[in-house]
Structure formats: C-alpha cells, structure tokens
Amino acid sequence: MMRSSSFLRGGALSAACASVVLVSAEVRAETDFVYEEVSGRISLESREFPESAVFPGQASHSTGLVFHPKLYVEDADGRSVTVAPFFRYDSTDPRRTHADLREAFALVFGEAGNSEWEIRVGIDQVFWGVAESRHLVDIVNQVDLVEHPNEETKLGQPMAHLTWSGEWGVLELFGLTYHRARTFPGPAGRMRGLFVIDDEHISYESSAGEWNLDLAVRYTQSFGSVDIGLSAFDGTSREPSICPTPVPTAQLTQHYEQIRQFGIDSQITIDAWLLKLEAIRRTGFRNLFCQQEEDYGAFVVGGEYAFYSVWDSPADLSVLAEWNYDERGQNATNVFQNDLFLAVRYALNDVQSTDFTIGVFEDVDLESRVLSMEFNRRLTDYWALNVEAIAFLKIGDRDFLQHGLENDSFVGLNLSYSF
C-alpha cells in the first residue's frame, strides 16, 4: 500500500509542477506544438538472495515492475515541455513500491551576443562528476536508494536552472526548493543493514524545513584534453545525518542540515588513458551517528585505460582503478572512507551493445570486500536484458555501516521493453 507521506510529497511535487504548467501554457498560447514524442520503458525485474535473511519478514526472492514513460512536446521555436513520471511495484518491500516525478520541466532558450542561454523550470535531474565508483560532487538531486545500493538513481528535484554558455565556458545557476528525503529500504527489505531508517519523522536544521531555498552554481570548461568543473552548493544536505532516537529502538532517524560544499571534478584524456578526479570540501555536516559537526574533505581519484580492438575484434577492454578517501576516517557517514575500486569492462561493440563489467571494492581500513558483476545486451530493437550480481565477500568487524548485509548478496535480472 502506498504510504500517506508519499502522497503528501507527491502533492507537493504536483504543486511545484504548476510552474511548468504556467510556462508551458504561455508557450502554447503563442503557438501550437509542432513535435510530440512519447517514449519510455517497462521493465520486469527479479532479485534472488541465495542466503537466508537475517531479519524476520525478509524474503529470499522479490519481483517487480517498473513503468517509466516520457512525453516530450516542442513548438516551432524549439521551446519544449518534458514530463517523465516513474512507478515501481515491488513484491516484498512496501517502501520500494513507490512513485516519483523524475522530470516535469519547461525549457526555453535564446542567444545573448556571442553567448547562448537556456532556462529550465520545473522538476529535473542533473548529473555532475566524472568518476566511476562514486559521484562525490553530484549534489543537486536526492538519491533514490531503494532503487539500487549504488546510489546512481535519483529522485526528481524542483528547480529553476539557468545555463549560460560561450567560448569562455558554461555557467549554470540553480535555485532549488522542496527538499526530497532519501529513500531507504523498509523492515522487510533486503540491503537495509542492522537498523531501519525512519522515513516518517524527518527533521531539518532550517526553520523552513524542506522548503528552504537552496542555491548551487557550476562552471565547466575544456582546455584541450582537460575537462574541468567547479561547483558550489549552499543549502539543505542531500545526504542525511543518521541519528539515534532519544529512546533506543531498532530505528534511526534522518536529519538534514544546512551545509556548504565546494567541489572540483576533472578528466584528462591522454591517448587511451582517462585520468579522473572528484574532490569536495563540506562544512556544517555531522559525522557518524550525529556525534558532532565535522568539516571535512573527500576525494576519489583514479582512471581507466582502454585496449581497443582486442584479439583483432571490434571489442574494447577497459581497466579501471580508483581510490576513495574521506578524511573523517571511521567517523565518515559512508562506506568510502578509504576504499580501492578495481574493475574490468569488456564491450563487444556489436549491434546488440553487449558489455560485461566486473569490479571489486576493497576497504583498506575496515577490511570489507564487495564484488559486483553486470551484463547488458539488447535482444531486439525494443527488448533489452540486464543481469547483475552483488556479493558481500567480507564485512569487517569494525565496518558498522555494512553490518547486517552479510547475507544480502543477490543476483538480479531485468528484462525491459523500450517504446
């Protein structure tokens, strides 16, 4: 059953969409749309957990259905409106059954001298960063963690987004409000760890709560083979401080503080080498289990090397290596305090876009090790297959953030139809 809070948040998102409706109505008042496109995907998914569950109510098998359509309309001047809702049904975890509005924005653009500008108003998703193992600088959108533990799936974020670009680079300004709380697995969900994260009693440092106005800016430029991005964010943290309750229970609470984050990301291309860096400096955030505020720096650095046309075939083989570091050490609020990531990606470059990736995270300090494998292949023009596996090979005794995951290794199957 859909949670009442989800409906309230959905209502608030609908209110945020009013700006999109107003802008799009203005666009339509001047001219009719000349191009319309409906696309999207429907997916059937399954996860199998070979080992017995640690907590009561958890299942060894789950199935799910995802519906993610997208409507795009454009007028004769290129102004457009995009709407992309998302719905997932999960057979075992009620929290994983959820709906979201990933995109619902109007876009207008123009020229100013030798520069170009673009404005997006509504709900959108933005990606920052270059690294493979973790998107450290990426802070505009909230993570939809119930979708996948790799933190790559995002919730839609209400925003006004101005882009100004020219030969001097690209400058982006963001005004963000209505903070989205992070999603977490429920009591019956696998991959939840020792504690359940409460998703009802969420607190904010700002007196405006989730309606605090957050601001972000990003500048990007390319200098030959060097791409660089500089970013700053001031507002409500996307990462929650996970705090104990006043009366000890099996649940922890989410608290969102006002933070300031400065970030840099860069990629250097040298022949078959891609060298990558993401680094941040964050202030105003509490450390592990809300012990105290602790300003900190963190980075992920590494690269990948591609062997093209291996074995006289069209296939490419890439080797990736990255180092994640957080200067808070064991007081870090994530599992990347001192971790190495090694991976190999084999892309066949065939018409089916077949690729294999196998990688491992090795926690240098806490002695945890996680293996991941992924296979992707298009079956037809419309059908595609994804198979993945995550194996918790070892959880260190001092790795509190991963305790309880020992038996949550899984194999997942995703069959999707694109239209």
Image: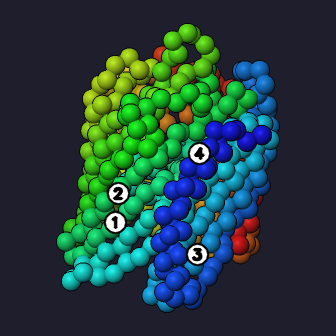
Q: Which mark is residue 72?
A: 3
Between the C-alphas of marks 4 and 1, the distance is 25 Å
Q: Which mark is residue 9?
A: 4
Identify which amino acid the numbered label 4 is placed on: Arg
Identify which amino acid the numbered label 1 is placed on: Leu
- Circle 3 packing at 10 Å, graded few (<14), some (14-19), many (20+), is some
- Circle 1 packing at 10 Å, graded few (<14), some (14-19), many (20+), is some
Dividing the picture into quadrants, the one containing residue 394 is top right
Residue at image point 62% right, 16% down: 250
Between the C-alphas of marks 3 and 4, the distance is 24 Å
Vertical comparison of 173 with 138: above or below: below
Between the C-alphas of marks 4 and 2, the distance is 21 Å
Which of discs 4 and 1 lies nearer the camera? The answer is: 4
Would residue 136 be visible to someone looking at this image? no
N-term-proximal mark, 2 vs 3 = 3
N-term-proximal mark, 3 vs 1 = 3
Q: Position of residue 178 (x, y in %)?
A: 47, 47
Circle 1 residue:
162
* Quadrant of image for the C terminus: bottom right
Between the C-alphas of marks 1 and 2, the distance is 7 Å
* Quadrant of image for the N terminus: top right
Q: Circle 4 — which element?
A: helix
Q: Position of residue 53 (x, y in %)?
A: 75, 25
Q: Circle 2 — which element?
A: strand
Dividing the picture into quadrants, the one containing residue 281 is top left
